[in-house]
Image: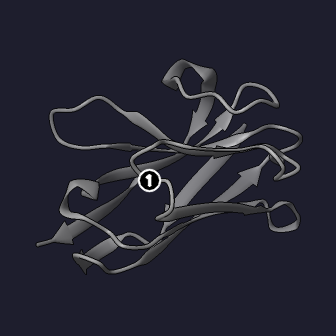
Amino acid sequence: QVQLVESGGGLVQTGGSLRLSCAASGRTLGSYAMGWFRQAPGKERECISGITWSGLGIYYANFVKGRFTISRDNAKNTIYLQMNSLKPEDTAVYYCARSKGPRVGVRVDEYDYWGQGTQVTVSS
């Protein structure tokens, strides 16, 4: 079993920044890719970003490119999401998840372990 715990969410004004963390416990993250997703009220969960174990393979959704940065520290079993230039439309619950394999996927069903989520609210 893998337990994932997100932290770092909160309320921020438009243009502000937040840094999300996702700490894993239990079994290590191994060679699996990790991803960040978000879900706004009434909308489907969507993939924001993903990163391979080596950190060499990174994916960003178009709507966060240039604003968000994903990273991971395998020694700490932790991944991060630096979010800059936040917009009201970024308001959502943010989740980290472990991929079922080494590649970064963009679909929810490509991930098997999920955190409980952390709320990010961007005020206008």
Q: Is residue 52 left or right of residue 24?
A: right
Asked if residue 119 shows in the view, the reply is yes
Q: Position of residue 98 (x, y in %)?
A: 67, 38
Q: Nearer the viewer, residue 70 or 118?
A: 70
Q: Is residue 46 above or below residue 21?
A: above
Q: Nearer the viewer, residue 46 or 3?
A: 46
Instruction: Give the residue displayed 69% in from the left and 33% down from the top.
Output: 104
Q: Which residue is mark 1?
A: 64
Asked if residue 22 shows in the view, the reply is no
Instruction: Give the residue displayed 88% in from the left and 66% down from the top.
Output: 75
Q: Is residue 26 above or below residue 99?
A: below
Q: Position of residue 28 (x, y in %)?
A: 83, 48
Q: What colour scheme was applied to this rendering of the protein?
A: one colour
Packing grade of label 1 (10 A; few <14, some 14-19, many >=20) is: some
Q: Nearer the viewer, residue 83 or 38?
A: 83
Instruction: Give the residue displayed 24% in from the left and 43% down from the top.
Output: 40
Instruction: Give the residue displayed 38% in from the left and 45% down from the top.
Output: 38
Amino acid identity at mark 1:
Val
Number of marks drawn: 1
Q: Is residue 78 above or below residue 62?
A: below
User: Of all residues shown, which one is farthest toward the top?
Assistant: 109
Q: Is residue 10 above or below residue 2?
A: below
Assign a secondary structure to mark 1.
loop
Q: Is residue 69 left or right of residue 44?
A: right
Residue 32: which quarter of the image? top right
* Quadrant, the N terminus: top right
Q: Is residue 44 left or right of residue 61?
A: left
